Amino acid sequence: MVLKLSFSCRDYDRVKALEDGVVRPEGIELNFLNHRVEETQLRFHEFDVSELSLSSYVLTLNQDNPPFIALPVFPSRFFRHQSMYINTKSGIKQPSDLRHKRIGIPEYQLTATVWQRGILEEEFGVRITEVEFFSGAVEPSVEERKSKISHSLPPGVKVTAIKPGQNLSQMLEDGEIDAIFSATKPSSVDRSDHCNYLFPDFKHVEADYYRRTRIFPIMHVIAVKRSVYEANPWVARSLQKAFARSLELAENVLKDRAALQYMLPWLENHVHETQKLMGEEWYWQDGFAQNKHVIEKFIEYSYNQGLAARRYKPEELFALNTLEAFVV
């Protein structure tokens, strides 16, 4: 008997084969829905399988009855040094100059900003208690930006919600804040000469960070409703294998020389350049063992920033039967 499961995720290249039905999880009929529904999923648990931000997922573990269990499948990863922006009139010449400055963030618990604050403290010595955060929409919005999941703030951390009608991008341009840490690029960086990247040569900085740490930051995980998993533990392994096969097919597309499937004329060269830095073995690796150190670092940051209730062991985040390696 085939188990029907709904699955909500963005249509990344690494899940495209699942969306198109080229790859089918064994024993599962997967109804793929291309939606960005994290807030809905966190509130109503509408989908059987879904993409969730790593930070939001860790926060659900603080609950008495966590509603989800994750797979070691990471559809979104991103180096976030390039997502730190400054007003150059604020006297910021280097990262340590952010001490005692005003930093705009969409949400305190946002995965990107957890990584950014952790890196700022660990790599450059600026503690989260030494800056003032302002939270809200990066661009003009009719809706107030609120945290997707409730949490408390640790002692000494200052977070002020911006006023209705304000947006962080304009505040950066006007000098009302000194920096923005965000997943999205503020429009003021493109239109204003005094709004720029904290790291103008971010590719070099991020490459150096990877060489030293071997960390390619995880943004999102795939999570299964715990009720579905507990009733059908086998689905975790079946889904994991299907995601691995879909990822493999996406890798093959990137290496295809017959015809470019993406509008990047030097795509193959970029792939080789990336592999030279990050390893000939495919660098966008899912799996627990390959990413344990990345998960450990995120949990450390989340806990130190007052989000994770405790320092969870990396194994606690994932379905038990997905922790061992396998061959597709």
Image: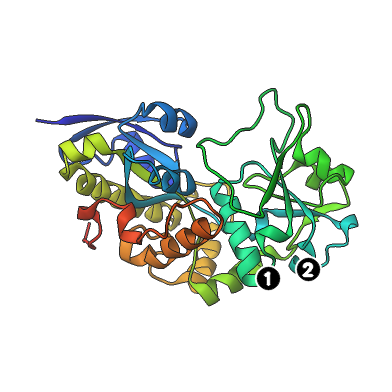
Describe residue 272's horizontal placement relative to residue 228 as left or right: right
Which quadrant is home to the N terminus?
top left
Rendered location of residue 247, percent (x, y)? 36, 51
**In the image, what residue occupies the spot 73% across and 63% down?**
199
What is the residue that sits farthest to the front in this orientation?
155
Image mark for residue 34: none
What's under tag 2, amino acid-wise?
Gln
What's under tag 1, amino acid-wise?
Phe
Label 2 sits on residue:
94
Label 1 SS: helix
In the rendered image of this protein, does residue 218 appear above or below residue 189? Answer: below
Front position among marks 2 and 1: 1
What is the residue that sits farthest to the bottom in this orientation?
212
- The disc, 2 or 1, on the residue closer to the chain's N-terminal end is 2
Rendered location of residue 211, percent (x, y)? 53, 75
Q: Residues within 10 Å of mark 2 (few under 14, many from 20)?
A: few
Q: Residue 45 is drawn in which quadrant?
A: top left
Q: CA distance from mark 2 to mark 1?
A: 9 Å
**In the image, what residue occupies the spot 68% across and 71% down?**
124
Label 2 SS: loop
Q: Residue 212 is drawn in which quadrant?
A: bottom right
Q: Do we see residue 17 in this rendering?
A: yes
Towards the viewer: 183 or 265: 183
